[in-house]
Amino acid sequence: MKKILLLGSGELGKEFVISAKRLGCHVVACDSYAGAPAMQVADEHMVFSMLDEAALRHAIATHQPDFVVPEIEAIRTEVLLEVELQGQTVIPSARAANLTMNRDRIRQVATELGVRTARYAYADSAAELLAQAQAIGFPVVIKPVMSSSGKGQSVAHTAADIDGSWDFACAGMRGDRKKVIVEEFIHFEYEITLLTVRQRQGPTLFCPPIGHVQERGDYQYSWQPQAMSAEHLKAAQDMSEKVTANLGGVGLFGVEFFVTRDEVIFSELSPRPHDTGMVTLVSQNLSEFDLHARAILGLPIPLIETREGASAVVLASHNGVNPRFEGVEQALSVPGVDVRIFGKPSTRPYRRMAVALASGSNALATARAAAAKIKVI
Ligand SMILES: Nc1ncnc2c1ncn2[C@@H]1O[C@H](COP(=O)(O)OP(=O)(O)O)[C@@H](O)[C@H]1O
Ligand SMILES: [Mg+2]
């Protein structure tokens, strides 16, 4: 039986644990709080901060897993680099976890590989941010180099917005580096996640593109497949192949692109299942979690079959504990609708608590209507 140490135990981790357990794995789920979603379905759990170097080293030494599987970005990845050198397998690779922990490093890799990105610069003060924003040209998007799910992210339309954006970024920042990335605002027609699977044996595989809509820098709903010209799809696949090959290792990656009328622009990448990819729980024969598990275990993936599907998030609106969900019955009474309630023990405004899934020809409207019926109390 293969042993997996899962670093981060959110909703994506929970579905991954289910997939891994179906293939007979033993999973130890770790996170900074007890009762995290993936812990509820894992064999064992450990509570510690993934940024705590000593605790992380201790967890790996104690369990001696076959695979260390990161589920979040905020991990003391230096420890992963170190244990990998000692023979530990890190998924997809310690380098991938290390480079994607901060936005600046992965962006630099993409640039060095000649992959098209939005024009960007860095700033570590409000004054520098203003200068860089003026050089790029307004509007610009500002994000802390260390953050996720849109935390600390804003759009500055004029110079008057810069101080507010700087303060907002500093407040939403993780870690100790006061540093932001400032990017050209891309007026995209749509954006996609291209789920990309690197296998131990066999070619890199691509799932059909997933379209999604974000608010406050956080995903609201997604659908698969997103219609795309063959040319644009090929461009995205080529960039994805290039970047994931550089990161190395095996597993599933969520690679994000902006698509304008004329071009495909690389945005960012997760070396693990992606939140917008929850749609694959209903739209694919093998979900992104199943694919990640198979790739990690070196099992074959002979076929990825897709049907139309969509997902829509259910967010909390207030701070609270032991949430209840109203309207689940109404949501599930619609044919083709399914729901995943993550089981998070507490709520805060905009915290993602559940997702509604739908398949069929009207999947997106159905999933959004189902999500709207569910209230977190
Ligand atoms: N340069 C940009 N131009 C236009 N929209 C952007 C830009 N950067 C980010 N966004 C919007 O914000 C969302 C979140 O940004 P992203 O860089 O993916 O951060 P996160 O790591 O929090 O997901 C994107 O999916 C997109 O909708
Ligand atoms: Mg993103």
Image (cartoon, rainbow, N blue to C red):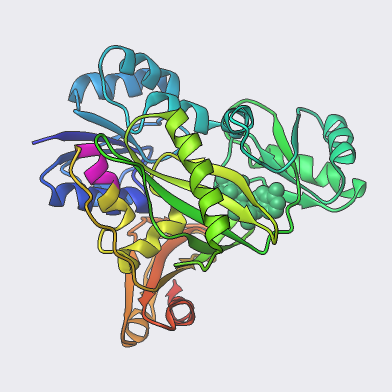
Which quarter of the rendering shows the C terminus? Answer: bottom left
Residue 117 pos. (x, y %): 66, 41
- Indicate whether 284 appears above or below 101: below
Residue 106 pos. (x, y %): 56, 32
Camera-nearest residue between 332 and 358: 358
Which residue appears at 19% of the width and 45% of the height? 300
Q: Is residue 318 visible?
A: no
Q: Is residue 170 visible?
A: yes
Which residue appears at 42% of the width and 79% of the height? 363
Magenta stretch, main secondary structure, is helix
Number of numbered callouts drawn: 0
Camera-nearest residue between 230 and 278: 230
Question: Along the horizontal axis of the image, is 377 left or right of 130?
Answer: left
- Indicate whether 223 appears above or below 54: below
Question: Along the horizontal axis of the image, is 94 left or right of 211?
Answer: left
Q: Quadrant of residue 343?
A: bottom left
In this view, which residue lies farthest toward the left?
A: 1
The boundaries of the magenta stretch are: 292-297
- Indicate whether 49 appears above or below 58: below
Which residue appears at 84% of the width and 40% of the height? 136
Question: Along the horizontal axis of the image, is 14 left or right of 65?
Answer: right
Residue 161 pos. (x, y %): 86, 49
